[in-house]
């Protein structure tokens, strides 16, 4: 019995040591990027929240002083939690652009069947570091893992071990930094768009069916999270803008065929939010982008040319509707600024989304 207690005690000490290291060091840079980008939001006019499709919004091209704070695979519960963190800091933005697409209401990264628990833990770590210890969307599982045994739920260990192995000559060098300018020049092969879209929507449908099996209330609770967020933003004098970015005809057709019920459910969520005062800019079915495969990196994400076209279109639309104030900025100069590669903490996540969509990354 004594040896058993000694074994358990040694295991506890080792676990706590690993936990301490995981809080102090972040080799992959994920937490560092989240932490460093947060203060830059203060005093800005706008902020982008949501998933990786936020890459399609380029504020310089819209003549808006905005900040990017979107993260790959972020669900609505996490959007609301991050927004609360920003709202309680000094000088929050006035315009809140929440980027989402049909079926987004069905995601819950904290669900038992979710493949994206690592993303929820990253958001928890960000909140914990800023003194917020509440659960996200009632998620007690990942909350417990993150707050009590962070070392067991921390994906960055892989990066650490790889670095050590490389130093001793047992592994190749880590991947080089992403060339953002080169990424912005990638285009979709029209001959592969349909098959890629089918594979993508099949994985999405299977994932969401597993989530539904354990919790059929996700869509309703997601809508409630956004509705409450809208109320908090309005209470601070801000405006919530739900942006539904364009996607290719291939992925739209496949999504409507395989997940038509979820698409209609999303449309209902959007309609109710609009009735509650949320500004909605819906371009998911926009024919100007549907077959312009030269404007997309993949079926879901705009490339540099696509982001430029969409950002200009979005700015004109929102100003014509009186949502944004008139602007006299130099658009040509803004385009030149936007063409320059942005720092990794603002734009690295869409690349991880592409890997996930190809099935090469299991979050």
Image (tube, rainbow, N blue to C red):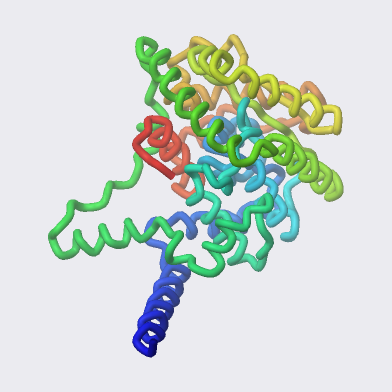
Q: Nearer the viewer, residue 297 or 196?
A: 196
Residue extending farthest front: 1
Q: Total number of numbered labels? A: 0
The quarter of the picture where the N terminus appears is: bottom left
The quarter holding residue 102 reads top right
Vertical position of residue 140 compared to residue 318: above or below: below
Vertical position of residue 210 compared to residue 47: above or below: above
The quarter holding residue 60 reads top right
Q: Does 328 sit left or right of 106 as displayed?
A: right
**Residue 142 image offset from top left, x and y in percent:** 55, 56
Q: Does 112 sit left or right of 238 as displayed?
A: left
Residue sitting at x 44%, y 47%: 344
Residue sitting at x 39%, y 11%: 190
Q: Nearer the viewer, residue 93 or 175?
A: 175
Q: Nearer the viewer, residue 219 or 233?
A: 219
Can you see residue 333?
no
The quarter of the picture where the C terminus appears is: top left
Residue extending farthest bottom: 2
Q: Nearer the viewer, residue 209 or 75?
A: 209
Can you see residue 79?
yes
The quarter holding residue 141 reads bottom right
Vertical position of residue 123 compared to residue 288: above or below: below
Vertical position of residue 2 compared to residue 236: above or below: below
**Residue 81 image offset from top left, x and y in percent:** 68, 52
Residue extending farthest left: 169
Residue sitting at x 15%, y 65%: 168
Residue sitting at x 40%, y 72%: 18
**Residue 167 image offset from top left, x and y in percent:** 19, 63
Q: Does 13 sit left or right of 205 as displayed?
A: left
**Residue 86 image offset from top left, x and y in percent:** 69, 54
């Amino acid at each position: 019995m004594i040896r058993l207690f000694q074994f358990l005690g040694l295991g506890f000490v080792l676990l706590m040591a690993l936990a301490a290291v995981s809080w102090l060091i972040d080799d992959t840079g994920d937490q560092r990027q989240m932490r460093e980008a947060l203060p830059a939001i203060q005093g800005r006019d706008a902020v982008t929240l949501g998933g990786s499709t936020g890459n399609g919004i380029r504020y310089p091209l819209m003549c808006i002083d905005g900040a990017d704070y979107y993260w790959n695979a972020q669900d609505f519960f996490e959007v609301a939690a991050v927004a609360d963190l920003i709202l309680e800091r000094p000088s929050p933005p006035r315009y809140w652009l929440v980027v989402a697409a049909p079926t987004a209401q069905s995601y819950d990264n904290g669900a038992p069947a979710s493949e994206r628990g690592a993303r929820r833990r990253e958001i928890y770590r960000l909140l914990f570091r800023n003194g917020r210890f509440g659960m996200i969307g009632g998620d007690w599982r990942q909350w417990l893992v993150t707050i009590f045994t962070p070392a067991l739920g921390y994906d960055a260990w892989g990066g650490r071990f790889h670095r050590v192995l490389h130093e001793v000559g047992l592994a190749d060098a880590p991947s080089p930094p992403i060339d953002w300018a080169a990424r912005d020049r990638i285009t979709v092969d029209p001959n592969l768009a349909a098959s890629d879209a089918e594979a993508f929507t099949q994985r999405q449908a299977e994932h969401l069916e597993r989530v539904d099996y354990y919790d059929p209330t996700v869509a309703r609770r997601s809508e409630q999270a956004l509705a409450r967020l809208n109320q908090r933003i309005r209470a601070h004098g801000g405006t919530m803008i739900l942006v539904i970015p364009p996607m290719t005809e291939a992925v739209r057709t496949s999504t409507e065929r395989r997940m038509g019920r979820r698409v209609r459910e999303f449309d209902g969520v959007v309609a109710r939010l609009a009735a509650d005062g949320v500004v909605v800019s819906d371009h998911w079915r926009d024919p100007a982008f549907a077959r312009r495969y030269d404007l997309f990196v993949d079926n879901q994400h705009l490339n540099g040319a696509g982001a430029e076209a969409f950002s200009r279109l979005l700015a004109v639309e929102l100003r014509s509707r009186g949502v944004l104030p008139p602007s006299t900025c130099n658009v040509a100069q803004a385009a030149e600024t936007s063409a320059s590669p942005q720092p990794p903490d603002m734009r690295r996540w869409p690349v991880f989304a592409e890997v996930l969509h190809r099935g090469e990354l299991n979050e």
